[in-house]
Image (cartoon, helix red, strand yellow):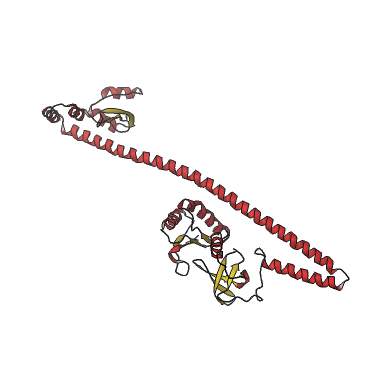
Amino acid sequence: MAIIDMLLTKKAKTVVSTHLSPLKIYALNKPEVINASVEFDVDTLKPTYHLIMGIPGSSNALEISRRLGLPGEVLNKAKEYMSNESTNFEALISELHKERSKIEIIKRELIEEKQKLEELKEKYNERFEKLKKKRLGELDKELKELEEKLSTYIRKIEESINLGRSEKEEDKIKAVKELYKAKEKLHRSPSSMHSVTDDIHIEAGDNVKILDTGVIAEVISVKEGKAFLKAGILTLEVPLSKLEKVKPLQKGDEEKSNSIVSGIQRFSDELDIRGMTTDDVPFVLDDFIDSLIRTNRSKGYIIHGKGTGKLAEAVWKYLRQKRIVKRFRIGTPKEGGHGVTVIEV
């Protein structure tokens, strides 16, 4: 210890190898000196070649001697020669090494978990890009179809206007008929904006289409310019101005209607994730919450169904991690019960 003191005054970098407990205690009390040890596996009697900084090494001499067959009476005599202070210190160091081993196991598990999370993140990003490209492709197709329809309507309107300029009475009558037909087609188009529906009589039992989303629903009741609708497990309240009466569902159309409910537009306050996997939940919900914020909506409805409950658990686990979500709850019976989670952002 005196030699180390002298070396410290000369600011010499020194490595000291020792088995003496007083030196280990000396290092603990000296800020300029730090303990270190080389890990040793007592079970296999082999070194692991791992350098451990901050923890002094424990003397495994007695344990190794016992494993090698040294008589018990010799080992017991050796323990009598060891001071209580030394024995207690060695026991403390031994416990520190055991705790460190546990920490190392946890550390390795965390590293493995981190690697798995990185792989999942990469997987999510790939799936998100695929979904985004698919959705953009669908939108592009819809826009092209709409453009073609509008071009057709415009062409027919122009033809009707030209007929209206004719001096022949039959041409003028034909022009009026063509314009009326064009108007009717525009009003029937899902993308047209209906503002007046006084001429459309909607009553309980009718099947209607919600113009904003294309969802097919059944009318439960009509009151004060609004209709109460049933679409799958949802009960909706929609103004009559945003509804279009459609023919009753034929056999096989129900499945199509359900698929439309599942495909509610991003700007809706409802998201149907039934049929998806728990892996899909993070990025689908992330996009949905962003859309609620962008459209200044404070409340959203996530339709996950009841089933095994795994999809609902994945939703709740994700929502707990989103600080932007103020609160969330199970839906009321009117909102869909346990098959729906209501969120507030």
Work out whether residue 260 or residue 63 is closer to the camera in this orientation and state it. Answer: 260
Compared across the picture, whether 201 is left or right of 33 comes to: right
Name the residue at the front extreme: 251
Q: Position of residue 201 (x, y in %)?
A: 62, 76
Question: Can the viewer see residue 32 in this picture?
Answer: no
Q: Is residue 141 above or below residue 110?
A: below
Compared across the picture, whether 57 is left or right of 72 comes to: right
Q: Position of residue 101 (x, y in %)?
A: 30, 37
Q: Residue at x 16, y 34 (%)?
A: 84
Q: Is residue 170 above or below residue 289?
A: below
Work out whether residue 166 or residue 98 is closer to the camera in this orientation and state it. Answer: 166
Q: Quadrant of residue 87?
A: top left
Tally of marks: 0
Work out whether residue 210 or residue 246 is closer to the camera in this orientation and state it. Answer: 246
Compared across the picture, whether 168 is left or right of 65 comes to: right
Q: Position of residue 187 (x, y in %)?
A: 68, 68
Work out whether residue 253 or residue 259 is closer to the camera in this orientation and state it. Answer: 253
Q: Residue at x 34, y 41 (%)?
A: 106
Say which quadrant the N terminus sits in. top left
Name the residue at the right extreme: 167
Q: Position of residue 3 (x, y in %)?
A: 28, 22
Question: Can the viewer see residue 232 in this picture?
Answer: yes
Q: Quadrant of residue 252?
A: bottom right
